[in-house]
Amino acid sequence: MTRIFSGVKPTGHLTLGNYLGAVRRWVEVDQHRADALFSVVDLHALTVEHDPARVRRLTRQAATLLLAAGLDPGRCTVFVQSHVDEHARLSYLLECTATDGELRRMIQYKEKAAPARAGGRGVRVSLLTYPVLMAADILAYGTDEVPVGDDQVQHVELTRDLAVRFNQRYGHTFTVPRATRPPVAARVMDLQDPTGKMGKSHENGAGIVYLLDEPDVVRRKVMRAVTDSGQEVEYDREAKPGVANLLDVLAACGGGDPEVLAGAYPSYGALKKDVAEAVVEVLRPLRERHAELVTDPGYVDAVLREGAERARGIARPVVDRAYRAVGL
Ligand code: ADP
């Protein structure tokens, strides 16, 4: 059976981008067609300055939201990365496989290192080695497919390179995985800056719809979305990125083709109204289920404990084999 691994970082509250670009497909498709593991990858939250209590809170919230969104522990494995030691164990072996040059070329490293350096805080080594830990996350489970948004494709390419290199050097150890991308809304953009993605760690929350935003907050954010000075609703990613993003979100929430949907709207205001309602409706069941789950912390604990046990059971023999292969 195909094995799938994917994850979310608890660096902020989960966004509509995380949901439409990743989690929804895990729920609707991936958990039904494969042996799927989904992880809240908390070790990855330590690569930049962080508050320990906040990371702990966000990890819990992300895990609860994955269950609220519909991941079914009877069908897939939901766990927290730091509960399974194999990730860090394997990461070290892969650090001995990767070169610093290939890590410095990663787009996300360049994007995140510059502000950290400019802020005078220094760049944590883990920011550079982040994709190596991500490779360990994936390779420890003999993963075939990694469903990710556009922004993570480069890291999956690196994972493939490391797997191939390790296998060539030390004998066949790792399955070489491939990235898969959702057909629609692969990249949801920030409502206030539609040239950048809707990312949970961005400072400006006004352009970001969080999964737990109240309906009125969602409406306000969508109604204030940046469009442009024109009047015409057209699907043009270059000339009208804000309008195109709204059409993409509408298509992703309600179905339909963004170009066809564009023709149905006489004004930006009418489009925004429908987008706001479509997003509110998509998030409604998720918020309701989340509210139920927070009243039952014992259930979430049990799911995460069993998830970690199952994950460990898969990863340990793979990582042990890798340790033997390199001569340890
Ligand atoms: P973030 O950038 O929000 O920190 P993560 O690294 O936790 O996201 O990624 C979780 C999943 O959500 C990944 O598969 C990622 O590609 C996807 N994702 C994140 N932001 C967006 C977005 N704006 N649009 C589409 N997919 C996204």
Image (cartoon, rainbow, N blue to C red):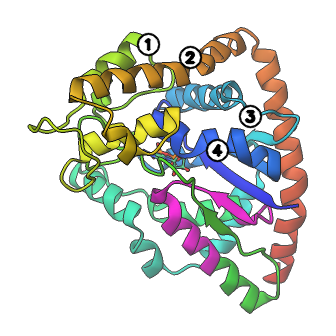
Question: Disc 1 to disc 3, how far (Cα)?
Answer: 23 Å
Q: At x 57% / y 58%, what residue is drawn?
A: 181
Q: Position of residue 258 (x, y in %)?
A: 39, 44
Check disc 2 and report its element: helix, strand or loop. helix
> CB under 8 Å between callouts 2 and 1?
yes
Q: Position of residue 266 (x, y in %)?
A: 23, 29
Residue 50 visible here: no
The foreground one among 290 and 60 is 290
The foreground one among 27 and 95 is 27
- Please report whichever mark, 3 or 2, sits nearer to the chain's N-terminal start: 3
Question: Disc 4 to disc 1, how far (Cα)?
Answer: 23 Å
* Type of amino acid at the residue the image marks with label 2: Arg
> CB under 8 Å between callouts 4 and 1?
no
Q: Which mark is residue 215?
A: 1
Name the residue tied to disc 2: 284
* Type of amino acid at the residue the image marks with label 1: Pro
User: Which portion, as a residue range, is magenta?
Assistant: 139-161
